[in-house]
Amino acid sequence: MTSNDKKMLRVLRGESINPPPVWLMRQAGRYLPEYRELRKKSKSFLDFCYTPEMAIEATLQPLRRYGFDAAIMFSDILVIPDALGQDVSFVVGEGPKLEPIRTKEALSGLSMDGLHDHLAPVYEVLKGLHRELPKETALIGFAGAPWTLACYMVEGKGTRDFQEPRSWAYTDPEGFGALIDLLVKSLISYLSRQIESGAEIIQLFDSWAGVLSPDQFRKWVIDPNRRVVEALKKAHPAIPIIGFPRGAGLLYAEFARETKVDAVSVDQTVPVDWIRSELQPICAVQGNIDNLALLAGGDALEREIDVAMDALASGPYIVNLGHGILQTTPPEHVDALLRRVAGAR
Ligand code: CP3
């Protein structure tokens, strides 16, 4: 098999494959007992991400169990604020904590100078995986998109609706725009290095795209994603890019057209008939099985899979969830999903 024959890459070039390739967001992580065991060896989550042997092992764990069509390197989107010099930590049971940045003046505390030195372990993870992965498995690199990174950097933690960055973006678009510009520039540099280290596909996670009004969405989601995609395509035209503007609703179509991503990853709120008629003609689609249906398992899960496969598998389609696997998901439910996809038709 040449690398171009990998199922993921064929779909991302526009081919329809039945049964389609499958991988799952957060396929590595705490729902797996072997991950929880490995994780105990590192006291901080960021240290774990920056120790290549740990991150490589965490990436490979779900592949040994399930043999997915893609491996997503084990890391986190918040390594970017960390590498830019912001204080980032993960508090057990609470999630990420950052020293909030809320003014243009505070941006002077961030710098791209140490970016690649700081992120060198991530590039080592990709090089190691490039050597170790089975030949049919595609290697996905990733980053948070500028808006979602800004959400955490400005708010300082996860919230339901990210009022601080949304307010800053209205009251001082120039200052907030300077943060977005810094992130666009950092991501182009970071993702180019990921590609040079062996990533065959890039996914951009814009997990909080859905909290914005349409005009703000165009300004802070579509435009920055478009700039990142354009620069990466110029330097690495053969590398496909998957966009994930979670919660974009009707704006998924405009996102796909304007950013020129090769695929969009779609959340569970979007009707599959609409995905088929409005998105699949523009690009490949990935998604959108409800992660709560995976948690529930049984008939509920099988129904969700059948509905998605019936609507989407005749076009370029990658089976995935609408958002990441939840921590309490029984690992057997992932086996059930894979069996249903393989046997469904
Ligand atoms: O298998 C994979 O998908 C690769 C690993 C991966 C992680 N985070 C590991 C992780 C990926 C792709 C991410 C992306 C990520 N991180 C996103 C975008 C996708 C999404 O879920 O919307 C976001 C918003 C983050 C930020 C983040 N990291 C949060 C909010 C949290 C805490 C919430 C939680 O689930 O605990 C993290 C921590 C994190 N990232 C863990 C893992 C496995 C858990 C920490 C631990 O194991 O101690």
Image (cartoon, helix red, strand yellow):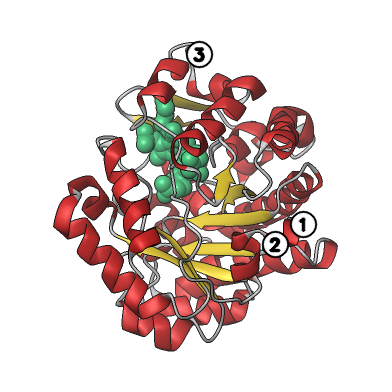
State the residue at coordinates (66%, 73%). Answer: 13
- Say whether disc 3 or disc 2 marks the residue closer to the N-terminus: 2
The residue tagged 2 is 5
**Vertically, is 20 above or below 75?**
below
User: Where does the image place residue 176, in percent across and percent down from the top left?
Assistant: 56, 56
Task: Note whether residue 76 is visible.
Answer: yes
What amino acid is at disc 1? Thr
Q: Name the residue under label 1.
A: 2
Disc 1 vs disc 2: Cβ atoms closer than 8 Å? yes
* Helix, strand or loop status at disc 3: loop
Answer above or below: position of 324 versus 306: above
Q: Which residue is label 3 attached to?
A: 42
Mark 3: C-beta under 8 Å from nearest atom of ligand 1: no
Q: Say if residue 266 shows up in the picture.
A: no
Looking at the picture, which amino acid does disc 3 mark? Ser
**Ligand 1: quadrant of the figure:** top left
Disc 1/disc 3 C-alpha distance (Å): 37 Å
323 shown above or below 234:
above
